[in-house]
Amino acid sequence: MNTDKVPILLTSSVIAHDTGVALKNTEARIDLAIESLSRWLKIDPKLPIVLCDGSSHDFTNIVAEKFPSSQIECLYFENNQDLVKKFGRGFGEGEIIRYAINHSEFINRAGCFAKCTSKLWVDNYTECTQNWNGSLLCKGVFLNVFSLFNKTVFSYIDTRFYIVSCVMYRKYFENAHLEIRVEHGKGLEDCFHEIFVKNNICFSLFNIAPVINGVGGGTGTYYKNSNKRKIKEMLRIKLVRLNSSFKHLFCR
């Protein structure tokens, strides 16, 4: 394995224990995970990838058939189904990541990982890793950036994709999913944001917006990344970085 590359951790659950998601068909979820693998390998054929499934689905055989020369580690276990049904897919994701960092050879060898949901990929992944600081890189979501009358607000962390060291993850985020409170509208993204702010984490937000593609499990539809949207996201980050209240949050 190329030790200079950050392993991609794809979090999967081909059986949708979270009954609130739109995409419930198991075969479709398997196909989309395979599509994600294919897309990641087009981005970089030498990427080490960890595909970890929380519904006891073993991808080993199909991965060996479709990607025989690739570095793909397949892990699987059974999430706590009752708690995932109660707290949603964010809870299941937290369990999957915990399992992966405790059992993946690729991740333990590298000491870090780039987490991405298994039905997604990041078109500009190479650009996103250029400022890897060895600790944490993630996307902050800010509201009212273009408003002339309302104050810009740091709202939440986009947990679909981020890069983190194992040390950083275990120290701050390993138990984030335990703080989810769906009855109060508090999801995993809010939990990450709360931890981020409470611990005064700095220099850890992406300077560029990750261009995330694929299918959202909650909606069951492909994302649309028009040029207009990409330009708007680029301007959003530039404006927030110019704001003295937030510029210390972005990577150097």
Image (cartoon, helix red, strand yellow):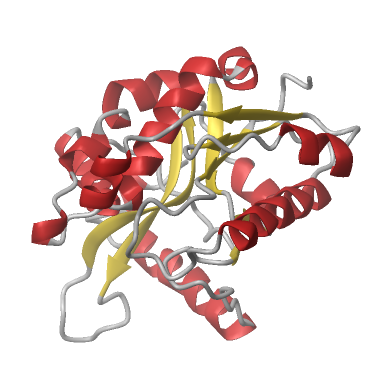
Q: Position of residue 249 (x, y in %)?
A: 33, 46
Q: Position of residue 210 (x, y in %)?
A: 55, 58
From the viewer's perspective, is 202 left or right of 233?
Answer: left
The quadrant holding residue 32 is: bottom right
Height in image: 90 above or below 99? below
Height in image: 2 above or below 54? above
Height in image: 9 above or below 209? above
From the viewer's perspective, is 222 left or right of 4?
Answer: left
Please tell me which residue is depicted at 16% across the width and 56% down the height of the picture: 182
Q: Position of residue 207 (x, y in %)?
A: 49, 53
The quadrant holding residue 214 is: bottom right
As drawn, the residue found furthest toward the left would be 184
Please tell me which residue is depicted at 44% across the width and 54% down the height of the picture: 16
Q: Position of residue 74 (x, y in %)?
A: 66, 30
Q: Is residue 203 visible?
A: no
Instruction: Return the residue nearer the eye: 158 or 79.
Output: 79
Q: Is residue 45 visible?
A: yes
Please tell me which residue is depicted at 25% across the width and 42% down the height of the picture: 82
